[in-house]
Image (spheres, rainbow, N blue to C red):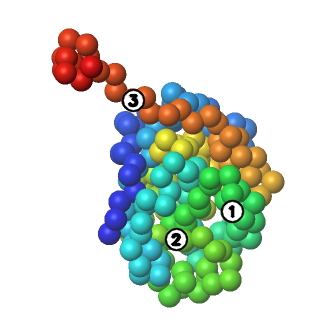
Amino acid sequence: MTALALTGCAGDSWQDNCQTDAQGIITCAGDNRPPAPELAAELLDGSTFDPAGYRGQVLVVNFWGSWCPPCRAEAADLEATYQATRDQGVGFLGVNVKDSRDAALAFEDGRVSYPSLFDPASRLALDFDIPPNSIPATIIVDRHGRIATVIRQAVRQEGLQPLIEQIAAEATVPVAEPVADPATADPADG
């Protein structure tokens, strides 16, 4: 198993620092965004998950199960949104919960083209504070690995895509180069 290079959640009160709208969508502004939990699981097809492909991208994480009618209803909208945003530095990753591998693979076949992690024990869902009985749920993680948006209901492309595009359009702040301390600089360096 491989881990996505994201840190663990910072305390239980991060949602208190974010805003919840009338539809129940939680949005967190820059400094109030908590770090996303680590994603460590194998892919649904049994292959190794490689988190390197998502570094520096906006990551849309969708929690789903083949036994979940709203998950079936949102699948086409998720795929359409993925196709519409992937050229903007946006990656999608499903997380299959409380399911058998065969049922999950059958569900995905022909519905979505992005990968899914296999999480039958719902450990990842709980790490993201998504109770397994409250799926589907979709989380948008910004380019810095922080939770920007949490949607604990089925999504439609017309609601999800603008949220993703807004986060994808945010300016990325480059990591500053360390500045040498003049007191410790080697005089031979110039």
Residue, disc 3: 177
Who's the residue at 74% across and 70% down the image?
76
**Mark 2, other Cα within 10 Å: few <14 / some 14–19 / many ≥20:** many
The picture places residue 141, in percent across and down from the top left corner, at 54, 47
Amino acid type of disc 3? Glu
Q: Which of 54 and 123 is in front in this view?
A: 54
Q: Position of residue 132 (x, y in %)?
A: 49, 62
Could you tell me which quadrant the C terminus lies in? Answer: top left
Q: Which residue lies furthest to the top in this view?
A: 183
Gap between marks 2 and 1, in whole Å?
13 Å
Q: Residue 179 falls in which quadrant of the image?
A: top left
Above or below, 52 against 29 in this view is below
Verify CB contact (< 8 Å) between mark 1 and mark 3: no
The nearer-to-camera label among 1 and 3 is 3
| Residue type highlighted by circle 1 | Tyr
- Give me the disc on residue 82: 1
Residue under the image location 41 percent in, 69 percent down: 49
Q: Where is residue 45 in the image (x, y as percent from the top left)?
A: 47, 82
> Which of labels 2 and 1 is toward the front?
1
Q: What residue type is labelled 2?
A: Ser
**Tag in front: 2 or 3:** 3
State the image coordinates of residue 64 (x, y, percent, origin top left).
57, 67
From where the camera sits, is residue 187 visible?
A: yes
Q: In this view, does 79 lie above or below 10?
A: below
Q: Distance between the residues labelled 2 and 3?
A: 36 Å
